[in-house]
Amino acid sequence: MGNQQKNDLIRVGVVGAGGRMGATVCDAVVAAKGLELVAVVDLDGAGSSVHGLTISSELKALADAHAEVVVDFTVASAARITLPWLALHGMHAVVGTTGFSDDDILSFKKSFTGSNCIIAANFAIGAVLMMKFAEQAAPFFDTAEIIEFHHNDKSDAPSGTAMATAQRMASASTTWAADPTKHEVIVGARGGQGPEGIRVHSVRMVGMTASQEVILGTAGQTLVIRHDSSDRVSFMPGVVLACRQVAGLPQRLTIGIDALL
């Protein structure tokens, strides 16, 4: 099922098509050259229509439409069911869902043996560069904190992007200065403690889409690296790129879209 059809269009299905992000993905797939939207699935939006396709509540609709690549922007609990099903049916997966555990990733790695899966905390090209720049800067600074801002409908905190950033910075340097805080007047005021003690702060705000700020400091100077997504369309070039390239990735499971850039 991983081979393209005779018309050379990659047949794409979208899981979570009834949500705002899923609807934006559907729009992007329809607008992109070389991609064809063939199936849409969502438990909550079942029965409604997206680009002339009726949203189904069953994953079977993806197989019936002979989808080759399936995009999943749902929640971790749903994706834990969807991804093994896609692997079983030989479909490639492009996943923007976050909140997976290390055990989840290991399980997905075991599941995808005949098709490929790419899981990315963030598909915005600028966000990927932000993480890379923060990783490169980490060895030259003594302290670092991450502040991530998201819309008020986001259920998990910190975001997958913030956690991925912290992990990459921690892997790049292990010589961070100790936190001098002795007493929090309000518990949690210093944020959550990530890898190597890097503090992560989560803001949930009406009117916000997605932003992240990485602040690094050393004697006499600070460096601020910030990325803002003011609209969900910022993630779509990365999603479209992943749909086009996932079948050719050298590994069955790829984390992040760095390998595509």
Image: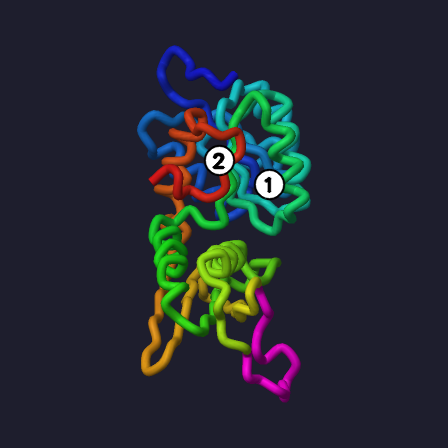
Marks 1/2 in contact by CB < 8 Å: the verdict is yes
Q: Secondary structure at mark 1?
A: loop
Magenta segment: does it hold 178? no
Q: Position of residue 96 (x, y in %)?
A: 51, 44
**Picture layout, residue 216 above or below residue 49:** below
Q: Which of the two labelled residues, at mark 1 and mark 2, occupies the earlier sequence position?
A: 1
Q: Main secondary structure of the magenta part?
A: loop
**Picture layout, residue 62 above or below residue 189:** above
User: In the displayed image of the protein, which residue is found farthest to the front?
Assistant: 175
Q: How far apart are the alpha carbons under marks 1 and 2? A: 10 Å
Q: Nearer the viewer, residue 68 or 21?
A: 68
Which residue occupies 48% across, 65% down? 148
Q: Secondary structure at mark 2?
A: strand
User: Which image quadrant: the C terminus?
Assistant: top left
Magenta segment: does it hold 192? yes
Residue underneath mark 1: 45
Q: Position of residue 79 (x, y in %)?
A: 63, 40
Residue underneath mark 2: 50
- Kind of residue at badge 2: Val
Magenta extent: 179-194
**Is any atom of residue 230 visible in this view?**
no
Q: Is residue 103 left or right of residue 200?
A: right
Which residue occupies 51% across, 23% down? 67
**Is any atom of residue 99 visible in this view?**
yes
Q: Position of residue 194 (x, y in %)?
A: 57, 65
- Kind of residue at badge 1: Gly
Q: Residues within 10 Å of mark 1 (few under 14, many from 20)?
A: some
